[in-house]
Structures are given as C-alpha cells and as structure tokens.
Image (cartoon, grey):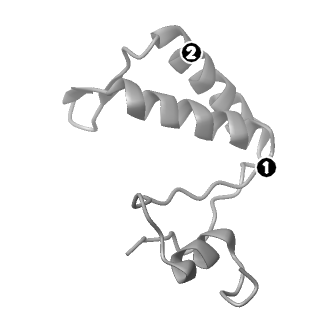
Amino acid sequence: MTTLADRPVLPPADPADQRELADLAALLTSAHGQATLLGPHGRRAKLPAASCDVLTQVIKAMRAGRAITIAPLAQRLTTQEAADLLGISRPTW
C-alpha cells in the first residue's frame, strides 16, 4: 500500500527562506552527488546520489512556487492508490 503525506508542503513565502532554498540549491548543484549531512551533535553522513537528486528536484520545484508531496511508490498501484496519488476519486480514474 502506498503511504501518502497528510498534506503537500507549500513553498516558503518568506524571502529569507527563499534565499536559503537558493543557497541550498547552489550547494547541491556544486556537490555533484557528493553531499554530506551534518546532524545536531556533529555526526556526519554521506548523502547518497539518488537522495541528492531527489532533494535537488524538490528544491527546484519549491523555488518555482510549487507545492511538494513525496510518496513512495510500489511498481504497481491499485486503482484506489492511483486515484489517491492524483487527488481524485476512483470512479473518476
């Protein structure tokens, strides 16, 4: 079964947050898939290239003013899962 977020995440309206997104986009672009996360206690973890790609796509969409929903997808969806993902009723599908 596909798990969907409770709600989409809206792009930030605050100009300071927009600048932070721009800085993050530039950092991820220059990282070439070699980014590292720094945790609150100084612990570091290498960010896998696929995760870096997803974050780059999310940031690009948010900078363009688009809301974001991330949902893991099985290779096959039921008609109800597809309708839920599209935000429509199953009979419409």
Identify the residue position indicated by label 2 in the image. Answer: 29
Residue at left offset 44%, top offset 64%:
76
Mark 1 neighbour class, 10 Å CA radius: few under 14, some 14 to 19, many 20 or more: few
Task: Indicate the amino acid at tag 1.
Answer: Ala
Q: Disc 1 designates what residue?
A: 13
Callout count: 2
Residue that appears at 22% across and 26% down: 44
In the rendered view, would you say 61 is above or below 68?
A: above
Work out whether residue 11 or residue 3 is closer to the camera in this orientation and state it: 3
Instruction: Please name whichever residue, 90 or 49, is drawn nearer the observer in this view of the structure.
Output: 90
- Of callouts 1 and 2, which one flags the residue occurring earlier in the amino acid sequence? 1
Q: Nearer the viewer, residue 20 or 48?
A: 48
Residue 17, located in which quarter of the rendered image?
top right
Q: Indicate the secondary structure of the residue bearing disc 2.
A: helix
| Image quadrant where one finds the C terminus | bottom right
Residue at position x 49%, y 70% in the image = 4
The picture quadrant where one finds residue 33 is top left
Residue kind at label 2, given as amino acid type = Thr
Q: Secondary structure at mark 1?
A: loop
Left or right: 29 in relation to 76: right
